Each structure stands twice: as structure tokens, then as C-alpha cells.
Amino acid sequence: MIPYGQQEVTEKDVAEVVRVLRSHFLTQGPEVPRFEQAVAEYCGAAHAVAVNSATSALHLACRALGLGPGDTLWTSPITFVASANCGAYCGASVDFVDIDPATGNISLLALEGKLTRAQAEGRLPKVLVVVHYAGLSAPMREIAALCRPLGIRIIEDAAHAIGGTYENEPVGNCRYSDIVVFSFHPVKIITSAEGGMALTNNATLAERMRLLRSHGITREPQALKYDDAPWYYEQHDLGYNYRMPDVLAALGRSQLKRLDDYVARRHALAQRYDELLAGLPLMLPTYEAPDARSALHLYVVQIDEEKAGKTRREIFKAMRAAGIGVQVHYIPVHLQPFYRRLGFAPGDFPVAEAFYARCMSLPLFPDLGEDREDQVISALQGALS
Ligand SMILES: *Cc1c(COP(=O)(O)O)cnc(C)c1O
């Protein structure tokens, strides 16, 4: 089976991990700040906080922004459940904004309309989580222009988007948001096995996230309230164990060195898909916009069922039978049983639901190679014929 996504681990990566395994620290040693510094520098952000997953980073981001019971978080429905769950973890209400069908990202028009109605009813969200679907940045300048005057805080869920650019600058610079979150899960652009990172230009938010990452405990002499004995530490908030191990930070930093190469290889493969799939009853994805270049985590086609004379379900099954690990990104989050129990129902976000009904992700990862890509293409030609 050719998977839809897969990591590449080189001998250099292995050597870095082994070097740390033989060192004094397995967790929270010198490798974590080195990885944090390297990502912050790459992105042009002031602070980076490494954690054990993007899910944890989203949770810490919401906590640092003060999200809690009585507040509301908005995100778009075509995403992984973690983009919404972070609000629920904090006891906040979660709601959704429909998508732009051309990109899968949040729709500016839908956002503007929903903000106007929410403002009139006095129930604006505290936090908006903006997902960069498949790696293409959402229109952050316009989103910030709508949200900032209303005091809404912005988190970019850039789990797909490290290595992408927006306005010719790296995604992650936090120019139009409070916090940007990356994932280093193996199917994402670069990996640390499990891992995530939260970037911010705000020193207070960074400090809060660092505290919450490790139980809410501090040992900083100037922060201690009751004692300063050499063994003394204090818990100042209800935090978690979300630390990234040093061993994995070394893997992540080693992978980061190949980030630009990975994104370039993804683009070369995507351009080949574009050329060789032209003419089939498909809509091909947008991964270059005037103001953005995708990191291309996913290559998602939309199947024209009418022209094809076949359903997405039939085509998906035929691909799987042919050994091609196609996938569907994503089942709209509001249709998950957990969110239906909170009152959401089919029809609530029709553009997202229509997108879901037609989408299928083809295999795309740095060392897919042209031979395997050709296998995917001929299987798709077969499934559609
Ligand atoms: C993968 C993903 C996450 C969660 O990442 P983990 O590191 O696995 O926790 C969050 N949001 C989006 C959009 C994702 O694709």
C-alpha cells in the first residue's frame, strides 16, 4: 500500500537521536531550546515553546489566551478534531465558520457575516483558530483586520503549513496572530515522531505556555513566593505534562534542516500530478495563491461524480483495492458524534459538507518518487474509467 503520507528518516537523523540517547538528558535538556530556537529563527518569530503534540500546543495556546467557561472558540469544520477540541478542553463553547470551497480554508465572507450577527447579539468569540488547510495559508491579513478591532484573539493552526509562505514571509512569524501552532506528527511536513510547537511574539504568552507545559511549576528564583530554598519549587497554575523529550527535539531539529528541500519536492510532485491528471473528471487543488505558497501537506482532489459517472465512495474503494492509500481530509468536525451531541447537525455548514462529499487526498510525501506517483495516477485513471 502506498500511504497518503510518510516520514523520511535519514542516517543523519538516526545519528542525532543516538547522540542524545547517549547523553545526560533524555527529556527537557539542551536539545529542546535548540530546536525551539531553530524553528523560531526559521519563521521569524520571537518565542517558540516545544511540546509533545500540536494538540497540546493548541490547548496551551487557548489556556495562555485565558479561554475558559462562558467563552466561545470558533474554527472551520474542514480540519482535524484537535482544532476544535482545544476549546472544549478549556470548558469553552465551540462553534464553526464555513469554508471557502476553493481552498478549504475559512471563508472571509462567512466570517464577516457571522461576526456581524454575533456582535449584534453580544456573543463574539474570544478565540478564532484559523486552519491553513493542506498547507496553504488562509488570508491572515484580512482575518486579522476583521478580528483585531473586536478584541478577538487569533491562533493559527499551522499543523500542515510549516515551510509555507504568506506575503513572501514564512508561516509562523505571528504577524497576524497571537500564536501559531505546528505539528511534527510523522505524516506532517517534518517530524519529531510526536511533537508540536507554539510560536508567539508575545513574551507573556510564551512564559504562560512554558509554565503550563510542565505542571504549572516554576523554579525561577525571582518568581518564587514563599521560599527560596535550593530544593524549592512552586506550582502557580494548573498545568500539564506536555514536555517534548530531548531525544525527539534532536530528531525535529535534524529534520528542520531539510524543510525547504521537502517542500520543494512536494511541489515538484504536485506539479506532476497537475499535468498528468488534467482532463480527468476532477478538480485539482490550489496550492499557489497571489499572496501564499503552500507547504503542500496534502494534495486533495475533488471528484466530479456526475462527469465521472461514479461516486467518491466507489472511486475511493477502487483506489484502496489497487493498493493506493488514499484518504479523506476531513469529515466535518461538527458532524462528529461528540459535536452532534452539543447540538450541531447536517446542513449547518453546507459548503464544508459539499467539500467533504467530493474530496480525496492522493499520496504525497517527499520520497514518493515518480514511479510510485505514476502508479497512483494509473490507478486513478482506472478507477475513473
Ligand atoms: C495533525 C493535526 C493536528 C494535531 O497534531 P498532533 O501533533 O497529532 O497533535 C491539529 N490540527 C491539524 C489541522 C492537524 O492536521
Image (tube, grey):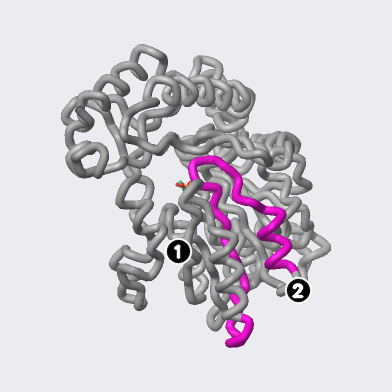
Instruction: Residue at 54% x, 53% y: name it.
Output: 131
Question: Residue visible at 33% across and 16% down?
Answer: 374
Expressed as whole percent of the image width and height from the top left, the position of residue 48 reads 69, 47
Amino acid under disc 1: Asn
Q: Which of label 1 and label 2 is nearer to you? A: 1
Mark nearer the N terminus (1 vs 2): 1
User: Residue visible at 63% across and 81% down?
Assistant: 119
The relative height of residue 165 versus residue 81 in the rendered view (above or below) is: above
The x and y percentages for residue 114 are 55, 73
SS at mark 2? loop
Which of the 4 image quarters holds residue 115? bottom right
- Give neighbour class at mark 1: few <14, some 14-19, many 20+ (Cα, 10 Å): many
Which residues lie in the magenta part? 119-148
Q: Which residue is mark 2?
A: 226
The residue located at (23%, 31%) in the rendering is: 384
Q: Are marks 1 and 2 in contact (CB under 8 Å)?
A: no
* Residue 10: mark in rendering: none
On screen, residue 131 versus residue 331, left or right, reads right
